[in-house]
Image (cartoon, grey):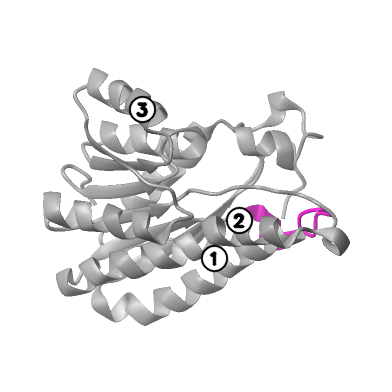
């Protein structure tokens, strides 16, 4: 697919993986809608994109707030009249033993890591189904294949994204919409500092590797699609 002038929403675009994805997509000529809570950080990403004459639009949005999500998609429809690609990247991590895990922390994780993905997919489909085309890529995590202690709720939220994505992919294939999952391992972001402080920083993947993986998926021929990619640290255990 030629990404030139494709309209893309990237959630969690202000830092880490989302920032890297946004910049790489803009380099390919896409119009990138930058969505995250912190406007100041979004402005920094936009300045980077502006530096090579890339195209982007800032839409501050807290993914834990349904009204912000609805406003995000309304803005995109108003500005562009279409949506070609949605990348659900926003996520948070809170760890702790399951036996005494606070219900408010459970709700924070599920609201951002799963409910927001559900709402964004739902709103994206309302635009994409009438178009009869579109692409949705959900960033999960390789924790869905693991059983790390103190990560039960985080893992549950990412497993929920997997279930949602697989069912949705089969549901909307007839409408010309493709859905994919990416499961990154340890990436050099703020989240990993709290989730896996045991990992040597020099072993972590750069966020740009996840961004380039997405570019690879989207630039395949019209006859090809990748449902799911697992990308890990080279020093991590295979499979």
Label 2 belongs to which residue? 108
**Residue shown at 44% from the left, 40% from the top:** 18
Helix, strand or loop for disc 2: helix
Residue 36: x %, y % from top left: 41, 42
- Distance from the alpha carbon under mark 1 to that under mark 3: 27 Å
What is the total number of numbered labels drawn onto the structure image? Answer: 3
Closer-to-camera residue (75/124): 75
Residue drawn 46% across the image and 60% down it: 116
Lower sequence index among marks 1 and 2? 2
Q: Position of residue 136 (x, y in %)?
A: 36, 60
What secondary structure is the stretch in magenta mostly built from? Answer: loop
Q: What distance separates the C-alpha of mark 3 from that of mark 2? A: 26 Å
Helix, strand or loop for disc 1? helix
Number of residues whose C-alpha sits closer than 10 Å to that of mark 3, classed few (under 14), some (14–19) or many (20 or more): many
Q: Any mark on residue 45, and which? A: 3
Q: Is residue 26 visible?
A: yes
The quadrant of the image that shows the C terminus is: bottom right
Q: Which residues are magenta?
A: 141-151
In this view, the mark in front (3 or 2): 2
The CA distance from mark 1 to mark 2 is 15 Å
Q: Quadrant of residue 43?
A: top left
Q: Position of residue 219 (x, y in %)?
A: 30, 48
- Describe the element under mark 3 as helix, strand or loop: helix
Give the residue displayed 48% in from the left and 69% down from the top.
165
Is residue 150 shown in magenta? yes
- The mark that comes first in sequence, 1 or 3, is 3
Earlier residue among tags 3 and 2: 3
**Few, some or many C-alpha atoms within 10 Å of disc 1 (few <14, some 14-19, many ≥20)?**
many
Tell whether position 73 is magenta: no
Numbered circle sitting on residue 161: 1
Q: Is residue 145 left or right of residue 13?
A: right
């Amino acid at each position: 697919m030629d990404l030139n002038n494709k309209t893309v929403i990237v959630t969690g675009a202000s830092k880490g993986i989302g920032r890297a994805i946004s910049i790489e997509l803009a380099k390919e000529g896409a119009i990138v809608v930058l969505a995250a809570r912190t406007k100041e950080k979004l402005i920094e990403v936009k300045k980077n994109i502006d530096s090579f004459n890339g195209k982007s639009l800032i839409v501050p949005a807290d993914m834990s707030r349904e009204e912000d999500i609805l406003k995000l998609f309304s803005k995109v429809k108003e500005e562009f009249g279409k949506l070609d690609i949605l990348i659900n990247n926003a996520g948070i991590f809170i760890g702790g033993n399951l036996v005494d895990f606070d219900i408010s922390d459970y709700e924070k994780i599920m609201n951002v890591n799963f409910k927001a993905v559900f709402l964004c997919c739902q709103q994206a489909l309302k635009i994409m189904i009438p178009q009869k085309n579109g692409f949705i890529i959900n960033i999960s995590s390789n924790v869905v294949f693991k059983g790390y202690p103190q990560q039960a709720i985080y893992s549950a939220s990412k497993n929920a994204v997997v279930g949602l994505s697989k069912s949705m992919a089969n549901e909307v294939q007839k409408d010309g919409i493709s859905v994919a999952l990416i499961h990154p391992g340890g990436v050099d972001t703020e989240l990993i500092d709290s989730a896996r402080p045991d990992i040597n920083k020099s072993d972590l993947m750069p966020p740009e590797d996840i961004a380039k993986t997405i570019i690879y998926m989207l630039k395949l021929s019209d006859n090809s699609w990748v449902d799911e990619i697992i990308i890990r640290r080279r020093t991590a255990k295979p499979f």
